[in-house]
Amino acid sequence: MISDENAAIAAAEGTRRLDSAALREFVDRRWDDEIVHALTDYIAIPAKSPMFDADWARHGYIDRVVTEAAKWAEVQRVQGLKLEVIRLAGRTPVIFFEAPATRSGSTETIVLYGHLDKQPEFDGWRNDLGPWTPKYLDGKLYGRGGADDGYAIYSSLTALAALDAQGVERPRCVGLIETCEESGSPDLLPYIDVLRERLGDVSLVVCLDSGAGNYDQLWLTTSLRGVVAGSLEVEVLDEGIHSGNSGIVPSSFRIMRRIFERLEDSATGNLLPPNFHCPIPSKRLSEAEATAKILGEEVWKKMPWSCGLDGGSVLPTTTDPTEALLNSTWRPALSVTGAAGLPSLENAGNVLRPRTAFKLSLRLPPLVDALKAMEELKTLLEFDPPYNAKVTFSAEAAAATGWSAPDVAPWLAGALDDASRRHFGADCAYMGQGGTIPLMNVLKEGFPKSQFMVCGVLGPKSNAHGPNEFLHVPYAKKLTATVAEVIAAAP
């Protein structure tokens, strides 16, 4: 391995010939002439992740977005680029590309990661917008998946092409673009096993599937929460009966409430099992405090609160920016994301329902083992049910442990700041994210010496997974140029 001092010297020499203004012009032109159009076509395709489209193979939408992305990638002027679509039986496909090193003597590899599968439609889109009806308005490309994370392959290859256009030397780069990330990446590990030798000696992972605290500077993600998801069902009857029998038959909903009391303090949202918590490292506390100073009340004001901030809106769990950041990145939280057994309001008669079922999403702190948490959660929910009701928790197979980044190497910290200043006019900022990217832990375990540049375009109000999701194109252009400069600076 190169020492930090020598790495800094090598990085400086490697970027000396780079013309940042010309790089940015190349990137902007590629986005305007090609990428926005390609992503417009991509958004129109309902390539939902397998968890949300069990017939994905028959529908062909995932294959279609993979084919279109690969077709675009294959004609990019990246020196020595080789690309293939790899398919394992019964699994979603993966795009793998390789661009050999143009720097003499370089032996390490940079992995560029993204995904092409999408979340489902969700309700609440503006009348002039929709998940599969792309619209480019005021620098924002609206529609499902453009920001999360369809742009990644286009941005990554544009960064490499921009360097090669100037003759700027770089290490070997490989791309790994999956199509089941939104399902928890269950298909990815088998592909990693198949590709492990071809990945090479990974020194840097660039992941473009994360967020940004604002659109004014580069943001590096330093941690990700884990997740356990599944369905909790309470059954008390074989069939619905007249509500005149209430008082004899216990409500399945009330039983559900009692079970929730084992798990969560309803007054605060605090998760009660101690094993779902972990100590917050001092470095992450300091990062949260620094981020809070940058963002201030925008940490919570950016949310689309009901009634609006000036109209008696719903209040956040805390108005302290630091505590709000820690709540959403280093503390567990429970959400109900779906329900069954509840008729629509217009079809709800005076009937005692036989069952209530909720889809649960439990976000876990980065250092909590998700598989152990899943086992504890199932035991907690099913043990000694009230009224001897039939209570079943069916966990999804895609439980994923969170991730905390290794310390940022001096060469990477310097490259991030330099590139952020040139393209954003401000230093790089650091923050945790509340979501999960399963691959990060896989790569951290498989390549323990690697550095991580985890970032993305999901800034304020971009609303990934929800209605009115958008890709902030001006930010994406700057991020693409920044990625190129960091790749050029890599030892």
Image: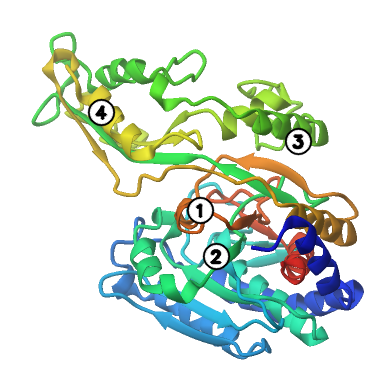
Mark 3 lies on residue = 291
**Residue 1, position as x, y percentages in the image:** 64, 63
Q: Nearer the viewer, mark 3 or mark 4?
A: 3
Task: Quote the CA–CA distance across marks 3 and 4.
Answer: 50 Å
Find out whether the residues at labels 3 and 1 contact each other: C-beta distance under 8 Å: no
Q: Amino acid at mark 4?
A: Gly
Task: Quote the CA–CA distance across marks 2 and 3.
Answer: 25 Å
The residue that appears at 74% across and 56% down in the rendered structure is 4
Q: Is residue 103 visible?
A: yes
Mark 2 lies on residue = 114
128 vs 388, left or right, is right
The residue that appears at 58% across and 27% down in the rendered structure is 280
Q: Nearer the viewer, mark 4 or mark 2?
A: 2
Mark 1 lies on residue = 444
Q: Nearer the viewer, residue 360 or 25?
A: 25
Counting other residues with Cα less than 10 Å from the Cα at mark 2, is it few (<14), some (14-19), or many (20 or more)?
A: many
235 vs 65, left or right, is left
Q: Nearer the viewer, mark 4 or mark 1?
A: 1
Counting other residues with Cα less than 10 Å from the Cα at mark 1, is it few (<14), some (14-19), or many (20 or more)?
A: some
Counting other residues with Cα less than 10 Å from the Cα at mark 4, is it few (<14), some (14-19), or many (20 or more)?
A: few
Q: Secondary structure at mark 1?
A: helix
Task: Quote the CA–CA distance across marks 1 and 2.
Answer: 16 Å
Mark 4 lies on residue = 349
Q: Nearer the viewer, residue 39 or 347?
A: 39
Q: Secondary structure at mark 2?
A: strand
